[in-house]
Image (cartoon, rainbow, N blue to C red):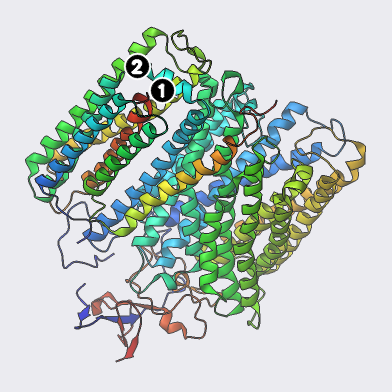
Amino acid sequence: MADHSSSTTHSRFFQHHFVDAEQQFQTAKMGMWIFLVTEILMFGGLFAAYIVFRLWYPDLFTQASTELNTFWGGVNTVVLIGSSLTVAMAIKSAQLNQKKNIAINLGITLALAAVFMVIKYFEWTHKFELGIFPGQFYDFGGIAHEKANVFFSLYYLMTGLHGIHVLIGMGLMGWLLWRSLKNHFDSEYYTPIEITGLYWHLVDIIWIFLFPLFYLIE
Amino acid sequence: MDTAESSSTSKKIQVQRYKPDDNPEKHYLNEETGLWSWLTTVDHKKIGIMFLGAITFFFFVGGIMALLVRTELWTPAKTFIEANTYNQLFTLHGAIMIFLFLVPSVPAALGNFILPLQLGAKDVAFPRLNLLSFYLYLTGAGIAIFSILNGGIDTGWTFYTPYSSTTGGAVTTMVFGVFVIGFSSILTGVNFITTIHKMRAPGLTWDKLPLFCWGLYATSIIQILATPVLAITLALVGMERILGIGIFDPAMGGDPVLFQHFFWFYSHPAVYIMIVPGFGVVSEIITTFSRKHIFGYWAIALSSLAIAFIGFLVWGHHMFVSGQASLASMVFSFLTFLVGIPTGIKMFNWTATLYKGSIDLKSPLLYIFGFFFLFLVGGLTGIVLGSIALDVHLHDTYYVVAHFHFVMVGGMVMAFLAGLHYWWPKITGRMYNETMAKIACGIIFVGFNVTFLPQFVMGSQGMPRRYFNYIEQFQPFHQVSTIGSFILGLGFLMVFYYLVKSLFGGQKATANPWGSRAMEWQINTRPPLHNFHHIPVIINGPYDYHKPMEEFQLGLAESPTDGHGQESDLEVTSDGKEINAE
Amino acid sequence: MSGHHISTDKTLLGVAAALLMLTILTVGVNYIHIPAPWNIITAMGIAVVKAGLVALFFMNLYWDERFNSILLVAGLAFFGLLVGLTLLDTLFRANVMPAF
């Protein structure tokens, strides 16, 4: 098949079924946005369950959230905001052809994501020590509400699903970092950073909502 | 683009006429050969064919289960299988038919093959994602089969809690299988929406988009919006079984009706995932075989989107007797009636398209006529079920069973078969036996009605669905229905027989055996590996039967050496709006 | 040009600073004990502003093709439908738990 747009030189990552690199870029981005819609609705199921239970048992949420540590939740929020910033910086570096900065920014993002997960790990294990397990394994006497287990089920499910997304994001960041070190990205071709960045920002946005919904209930 | 000439106001494009070859030496099936080339292909046509093979397999698996269920119901008590086996059979029949056949049938099999051809694209936007979608489907199907062999499931395809969270068997693995299949469906949806937005050929504006594409577009919207909710809901059921999270299980403090809300938020729109692509097929076939412009193009296109949207507002009509608030029941019942409006718009427009058309009653159109009758009955009985007072009486009776089989089998399977017959020559390059196709269509139609009409009667008399035993009063109805199901099965086997037979020694198909104006018929039969040897340019809508065929075979003029096009004779603007004879 | 907008360091750092301030604000407001339901409304309002900043400037929706914004809004709208129509049941039941 002849390449129909031979007038411009293409990156080696150009796929032949597109007319030009611009179309490929815009297509990838729209595809990612559509995928993000599916992510919103997937988390949406859990958020809907949260809303239903919170409106049924407002006391439960006020009482149970005292077991969550607002300080570390806040730190994690700041960590994720920082990682969002560095992803955006990585994209900017790619657009300006500053190849070294791409790798640096991606590296910082990866590190911040790891910090997030470590903090998350200590939060969870601390609760496990208290006997706050999800669902039927819940074994904690500190909250005088018969449905306390449901609150923590929601907590573990929502932060857990979010955590899985962070882990996937870390895998993607690692892959991008590896590729950037192999000099795959420049101002002509940075689609993977752009769309992974979109994914990462959405993970950040979800945490922006999870934080007040779980940690900031008085 | 080298050949494009720009003028001060609008871009002019040199176009040439590209006449398709009837039986070219090289096509998508023989340019790359061998098993490995199939397993690793990113060609949307081959992926479509692999989907077609897979869904056909599961259609017959699900069909055999249906026949076993019907045979068991021959007598009021046990006929030949145990009650527990019976429960598993109807569960698997439902789950397999819905998740492994109906949902992927038209979009993933026919849509994959046809959509890029109709758009004038070389492939879908994300070919590798497309292949991943197929393997996720197979993985999910594999997990489902594993669960069948590893304990089975008896919850019904709906997995209602608290039964599903407490019963034995392999429910956990089964919901995981469906979860994976859901991702296959999501990826197809993502791919199709992006493809329709970004991969259209020059001149293919939204008002020239074939209605099959509109149908797939509406379907994909539902897939991406609804399927994730199913995924999380089933994941919650799995967690309910593993951890006892207490979201749905009342014993742990949860609310089982909440499960039904989440489940039907997907599963009601999913009904439209199954039927809306069928609507698209109908529109294509109706115009081709009545040689007439579609009546009410925008009405049909937008009613697909309207159905997709309204489909999200009505899920509560599955829950009138679940204990949900009566306020919710009233609102859902009212909204349910709204679905009838866009569906009615479609039926009237299709009928109007036929009016004074030059009708050529080939087998695809015959299947569509079957669709009209059966879908009409299915749709109108749906209105009946949407009214609260009647539904309280008819809920979970055979009336419901008959209703959704009229829509799903009578509507969707008929539309799928119509589409399969219509595009079969393009896909395989062979013509099937037309006489046998017509006879099979008749057998299916008769068999279907014999199977399901009695179910309306016994349902309205109070025969509950999913029951193993029943009172003797219903035996004649059940027996007629069972006889009908075997006639229906015979019809499907016959279709399978003559279609497969056509592959070996069937008459060779020409590039455009039906004389259609749609894009997929303006290329070689069988299509080349990358669909088009040229960049197609579209200046007419796909249903402009009053215009000569040459105007539908235009492509961007390339260098004179490429040897495919004829001499340049036309100039069009880049948005395809005007033609100037040169 | 859509999609290839190059953000300046100033914009990116400014947005990040704003997000940081809003995070501190939302934690701070939490200790003031605004009476319900205004506490939730404030917290969610701040979260929406933060999410909006991320979407507009980090995800570039402000400069991007309109359709991508439509997608985001549509996703949220259908989430709203899921919640809204479910609440139509759960808030209006005679008993929270249906009789078994």
Amino acid type, mark 1: Tyr
Label 1 packing within 10 angstroms: few (<14), some (14-19), many (20+): some
- Given the current orientation, which residue lies at the most extreme right position? B473
Label 2 packing within 10 angstroms: few (<14), some (14-19), many (20+): some
Report, in whole angstroms, how far the alpha carbon at label 1 lies from the one at label 2: 8 Å
User: In the depicted view, which residue is nearer to us: B330 or B109?
Assistant: B330
Left or right: where A179 falls relative to A164: left
Q: Position of residue B326 (x, y in %)?
A: 67, 41
Q: Chain of mark 1?
A: A
Element under disc 1: helix
According to the picture, the residue beneath numbered tag 1 turns out to be A156
- Residue drawn at x 61%, y 33% is B257
Can residue B333 be spotted in the picture? yes
User: In the depicted view, which residue is nearer to us: B395 or B548?
Assistant: B395
Left or right: where B12 falls relative to B475: left
Residues at marks 1 and 2 on the same chain: yes
User: In the depicted view, which residue is nearer to us: A136 or B559?
Assistant: A136
Q: Position of residue A15 (x, y in %)?
A: 26, 55
Q: Earlier in the sequence, mark 1 or mark 2?
A: 2
Element under disc 2: helix
Q: Position of residue B67 (x, y in %)?
A: 74, 42
According to the picture, the residue beneath numbered tag 2 turns out to be A124
Task: Give the image quarter of residue A86.
Answer: top left
Q: Chain of mark 2?
A: A
- Residue drawn at x 78%, y 34% is B467
Q: Position of residue A94 (x, y in %)?
A: 13, 47
Asked whether disc 1 touches disc 2, contact meaning CB atoms under 8 Å apart, the reply is yes
Left or right: where A2 falls relative to B167: left
Against B210, residue B249 (above or below) is above
Task: Give the image quarter of residue C67.
Answer: bottom left
- Residue drawn at x 74%, y 42% is B395
